[in-house]
Amino acid sequence: MKFQEYGPEQKDVILLLHGGGLSWWNYREAAELLRDEYHIILPILDGHAGSDRPFTTIEDNAAELISFIDERLNGAVLLIGGLSLGGQILLEMLSRRREICSHALVESAAVIPSKLTNALIAPAFGGSYGLIRNRSFARMQFQSLHMKPELFEDYYRDTCRIQKRDMIAFMKANTSYALKDAFRDSAAEIHVYVGEKETGEIRRSAEAICRLRPACRLHRMPGLRHGEFSINHADQYADAIRQIIQGG
């Protein structure tokens, strides 16, 4: 796994895990805002543009990141955040290692498997994958994600670099992930963020996370769609991290 890093190495570490189909630039602006206060590490998840290995499973990515934290960061970090697929990997990390971080920020993570959606991914992408290099098609896809326009070139460049097998693999993993019972034993202070304009599946998943571990704090964000919090509102996202760490 490869990493982008910001800020002095002697500072407390924040690890931020990007969404599926994106890359480290998901958090670039937030990292710039926080770099004077913390050491920010942005992993490039397996199978994504710039990664060094194919995507296998959410569980494998979680194990890789835990090993990285053990080998380089003394077994724990201050805070881990994750969006969507990155949020699922974060939940898996919390399930596997109860003291992997002091604070966690889970954004828009699905934990209710969808058998129908999962079954449709391979045939759907089998026929449309070739279109991702078409700029007009890519722009329509980008607009449907409601990301700010200045991120289009990052999105287009890196989407074109994702292999078909990897895209299918991480999308199937995303739609089949179920939260582990061991998550309830995490020692971290966990904050769950969900936009009020997200799908019912994502909103129900946020509630399911908090039911399994009632100490979680659920934040419903008015007017926001999937991923908009960290991607489009980096200043608010950085402030949320500061408030979580400071106990606000």
Image (tube, helix red, strand yellow):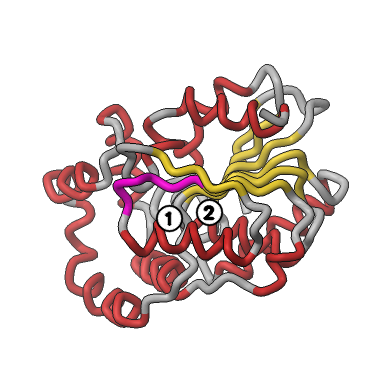
Of label 2 and label 1, which has the lower sequence position? 1
The quarter of the picture where the N terminus appears is bottom right
Can you say whether 163 is above or below 193 in the image?
below
Residue at image mark 1: 20
Rate crowding at label 1 as few (under 14), some (14 to 19) or many (20 or more) other CA atoms within 10 Å.
Answer: some
Q: Nearer the viewer, residue 52 or 39?
A: 39
Residue furthest left as drawn: 136
Q: Amino acid at mark 2?
A: Gly
Magenta stretch bounds: 193-198
Can you say whether 102 is above or below 201 in the image?
above
Find out whether the residues at labels 2 and 1 contact each other: C-beta distance under 8 Å: yes
Residue 94, image quadrant: bottom right
Mark 1 residue element: loop
Residue furthest right as drawn: 74
Residue 128, image quadrant: bottom left
Mark 2 residue element: helix
Relative image position of residue 207 (x, y in whole percent): 49, 60
Residue at image mark 2: 86
Q: Amino acid at mark 1?
A: Gly
